[in-house]
Amino acid sequence: MLEEQFGGRTNEREADASQKAFRRAIVLREEGRFDEAEALLRDAVSRDAGNADLHNARGVMFAATGRHLDALWCYRDAAACNPADPTIWTNLGNALTCLKHLRTAIGCHRRALSLAREDDALLHHNLGNALAEASDHAEALVAFSRALEIEPSRHGARWDRARSYLYLANYRQGFLDYEARTVTGQLPARELPGQAWDRRSYAGKRLVLVAEQGFGDVIWAARYLSRVKALGGELIVECPAELIPLLDALGVADRLVVRGATLPEGDFHCYFCSLPGLFTKDSSSIPSAPFVRAPIDRVRRFHELINRAPSRLKVGIVWSGSVTFKRNQERAQSLLKFFQAFALPGVQLFSLQKGPPEQELRALPRGGPSSIFLPLLAILPTRPRLFNILI
């Protein structure tokens, strides 16, 4: 969770117009009107080019809309105007982190800390994020922990520290910190039935498991369902509609509820991704037995379709995750890259992609391998399309 500082050290000697523009930009930012604020600040900078706060504030607006390269240039201009301001240096570090210039980003954050008049939780937090992005999780833990020592209520730092702990396989502390997501605003506000469940026996009572985050989060946490069921009475499981056949095949839940529908009354509730923290304290306690099974009828129909293809090396590909995930661009690849990388004799590609990225199938170069579209019934209940590339 990167966090920019808006600054605000305009002084009485600055032009009145610049002060008014700066204050108005603050209001627009709070209202989420970032483009308007940037335009206002751009005009103000043209009249007062030596004002570091205006340059810095404009960079904050660009960062808020994901334009990190534009933000970078604003922060550089701000630093040229006022190289002693730690706010500018940490914002510059954030922009560099987003652009994956990680070592330089870490240097900027350390510069910010050296310039700060007092220990600042936000500066340590931002440094921790840059270190974590650089896979230096041991040092990131030091930075996140220092931020929390200064400001214990900085829940975003606790969430970020959780991911570093988990990366280093410290599951006990990692999953404890992972609960910070329930107070950071990452989960939608909603009324949940009963009281929070803490792994106690609920024999004769009802426990409602609440879905959260993406499909993958529901699936990886589903390995704990049998352990949950063994502790009590009625188990109600909320999950995305697309995953109901998958979880139903496990035969554990007494009832499945589509995410978004009204939850039934219950004695206890628990978020799906809180289950590992209740059952896993170290790697030896992670359930190792297979726990996911595709519905038999879908497996049969899947093989019927796949077996129609010539006997070649068959490769199923997915080139994008959910497009609503804000960091999807960091894990997704274009279909064309797969198309080019697998242009080998004897290789046959099958598209297992679902959602908007499927449209890329229509943009493949003409004159390439022949394509056949067939319905593919796999694990998920809706019907993705099969793209058969014959090479």
Image (cartoon, rainbow, N blue to C red):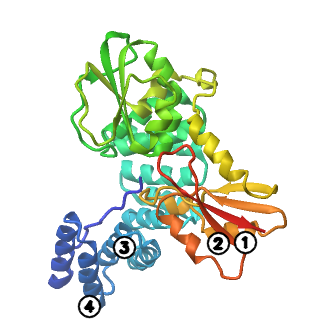
In primary-sequence order, the first of circles 1 and 3 is 3
Q: Nearer the viewer, mark 1 or mark 4?
A: 1
Which disc is residue 62 wearing?
A: 3
Using the image, determine if residue 301 lies above or below residue 345: above
What residue type is disc 4 on? Answer: Arg
Q: Residue at x 43, y 78 (%)?
A: 70
What is the CA distance from the residue labelled 3 to the residue labelled 4? 19 Å
Numbered disc 3: secondary structure: helix
Q: Residue at x 23, y 82 (%)?
A: 40
What residue type is disc 1 on? Answer: Gln
What residue did someone put label 1 on? 340
Q: Nearer the viewer, mark 1 or mark 3?
A: 1
Contact, CB < 8 Å: mark 2 with mark 1?
yes
In the rendered view, does 319 fall on the left or right side of 308? left
Which disc is residue 336 wearing?
A: 2
Q: Position of residue 262 (x, y in %)?
A: 23, 36
Label 4 Cα crowd, 10 Å radius (few <14 / some 14-19 / many 20+) = few
Which disc is residue 361 wearing?
A: none
What residue type is disc 3 on? Answer: Phe
Contact, CB < 8 Å: mark 1 with mark 4?
no
Q: Position of residue 56 (x, y in %)?
A: 35, 73
Label 1 Cα crowd, 10 Å radius (few <14 / some 14-19 / many 20+) = few
Which disc is residue 47 wearing?
A: 4
Q: Nearer the viewer, residue 175 or 269?
A: 269
